Amino acid sequence: MTIFKYNFKRIIQNKGNWLLLILLPAVLMGILFSQTLVSNTYKVAIIDEDLSQASRDLTDLIDNEAKLVEIEDVDEIKDGLLDRKFDYAVIFPEGLEDKLKAAETPEVIDYSLEESNVAGPMRAIVNSYLSSAVQIAGAITNPDNFDQAMKDYLTSPFSGKMADITETDVLAKSTFQMSLGIAAMCILLLLTFSTTIIVKDKESSFLARIEVTGTSRLQYQIETNFAYFTIALIQIGLLLTLAQTISKYQVAVAMLGKIFIIFALFALAAISLGGLVASFSSNSRQSTAIISLITIPMSMLGGLLWDQAIMPDWLQKFSLAVPTTWIMKGAEGALNLNNDLYIKSLLILLGFTIAFTLLSLLGSKEK
């Protein structure tokens, strides 16, 4: 394990790596959390197609927590979000109240630019009202009593307390999810840039020298990758703890374990990607340039820096071809107890890891 210890120390002793290991994610997560505290700056656009008492109730509830911005058409939503005229938009469809009275949950469409800041608490208000209305409609025997029952519910102190609890919890969850995106980006950057060590060792003829000692290139590669993976596990543990602490979101142990596992698999994909770049690079400058060109766009496409919903449909489809998309989908599956999405994300990340590894072996043979 000499190579493992040697390269482990090289990564740890590099002061620049500590920036990506813990300092940069801590600063970015802190900025993210501070933004969530400024709730009085929320600007929300509402399109009311139902014009019912239920839609007016929802509008009043949102108005209590945010500043309402008037828009007349759905086509104004995308430009309004991009131009920062408002942060969140919601459409109350025609027939909303009729469905509620029939104890059915209507489909409410919403849009947001920054998932963590606005969509979470606003969506919590809407969903809390809708779920309560459905339960009340299912419990009363006379549909004519629905309006009075909802009025009693809205004026009860219990409903307000529950709404506050729900909003706080959803806001913490949204902040935690965005913190995971920051963590994934820093893991990707640290691991891919660290693999330039392999290129530097080739440049300095270090690989040729260790072969004289009886250490094969395969053993060198295995121990070096094991050093990267050990660093990754430490970083994942630190960043998940940091994300929980900053967001104040309490994650169940089993759920946190699933997130740790998918982040570990993402780390393997990042290591294999770095190895792929190293195998086709002639020098460390070239590998650093290639990694810079790959990792930043990959972070953007994968939704590590913003909500993918703001991207055009064709770009969202293209983003399915990068591993960063699947680390976020896997984390989402773990948090929302969606095992199908979680397992699918695990398998796709495993596929990326295998593909990158095979391509790097091909590149090494050609060299």
Image: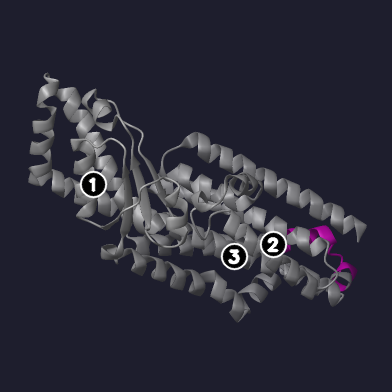
Residue 149 magenta-drawn? no
Please report the residue visible at 60 percent of the width from the left and 55 percent of the height from the top: 301
Q: Which residue is mark 1?
A: 59
User: What x and y, as percent, mark residue 186?
Assistant: 56, 65
Q: Nearer the viewer, residue 93 or 75?
A: 75
Which residue lies under the disc numbered 2?
A: 294
At label 3, which amino acid type do we have?
Ile
The label nearer to you, 1 versus 2, is: 1
- Tag 3 near tag 1, CB within 8 Å: no
Of residues 321 and 184, which is closer to you in this image? 321
The amino acid pointed to by label 1 is Thr
Label 1 vs 2, first from the N-terminus: 1
Say which residue appears at 59% left-offset and 65% top-offset: 231
Side of 104 relative to 234 (left or right): left
In 3D space, how far apart are the residues under numbered discs 1 and 2 (Cα atoms)? 44 Å
Q: Where does the magenta region start and end?
A: 209-225
Of mark 3 and mark 1, the one earlier in the sequence is 1
Q: Is residue 191 above or below residue 320?
A: below
Label 2 environment density (alpha carbons within 10 Å; few <14, some 14–19, many ≥20):
some
Q: Kindly tell me whether residue 1 is visible in this rendering.
A: no
Which one is nearer the viewer's eye here, 209 or 333?
Answer: 333
